[in-house]
Amino acid sequence: MKKILVSTANRKEGKLLFEAEPYEGSTNELAPTGQILADSDQLSFIYILENSEEFIYLNLPHHLWGTIHEARNSETEAAVMINGTEIKLNNFFPEMQALLENIKGNANYGEDMEKQVSGSFSL
C-alpha cells in the first residue's frame, strides 16, 4: 500500500483544498473511494484513493484538523491537489462526520486519538 502525505489544507471558493507531497505514481488513475479511516498510531485520518491495482492512503495528519473542523460546517466539497492534478474527495464531509461521531468517547481508538479528536473538533 502506498501513502501520500497531505502537507496543507486551505478553504478556497467553497471547498476544502488539500495540497499533497509529490507522488511518484500516475495521478490520472487515482480515484476517490469515499471512505475515511482513523490511524490512531499516527494521529491522522486516512482518505482512501484507489487505482486499478491497489489502494493509496491519503494521510491527513493532526496539524490539518483545525482547518478540517472549520470547513466541515461551511464548505460543500473537498479535493486534493497531487502533482498539479485536482482530485475531488467524494463523500468527504459525511464520512468525516460519521467517523468523528464514532470516535467520540470510544476508547477503542486509544486515549490519545480520542482526546485529540475531541479537542480539535469540539466534540
Image (tube, rainbow, N blue to C red):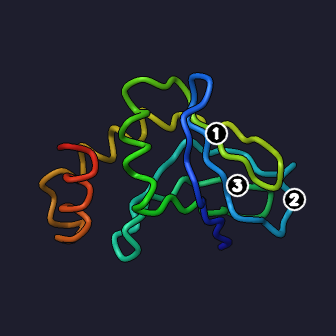
| Residue carrying label 2 | 26
**How many angstroms separate mark 2 from mark 3 (CA)?**
11 Å
| Residue carrying label 3 | 50
**How many angstroms separate mark 3 from mark 1 (CA)?**
15 Å
- Count residues near mark 3 (Cα–Cα under 10 Å), then give few for <14, some for 14-19, many for 20+: some
**Depth order, front residue of 91/123:** 123
Q: In this view, does 102 lie above or below 54?
A: above
Tell me the amino acid under the disc marked 2: Ser
Mark 2 lies on a secondary structure that is loop
Q: Position of residue 74 (x, y in %)?
A: 42, 23
Q: Which of marks 3 and 1 is nearer the N terminus?
A: 3
Tell me the amino acid under the disc marked 1: Ala
Q: Which of marks 2 and 1 is nearer the N terminus?
A: 2
Mark 3 lies on a secondary structure that is strand
- Count residues near mark 1 (Cα–Cα under 10 Å), then give few for <14, some for 14-19, many for 20+: some
Residue depicted at 54% across the width and 34% down the height: 11
Residue depicted at 43% across the width and 43% down the height: 68
**How many angstroms separate mark 2 from mark 1 (CA)?**
17 Å
Discs 3/1, front? 1
* Residue 25 in the figure: left or right of residue 96: right
**Depth order, front residue of 110/120:** 120
Discs 2/1, front? 1
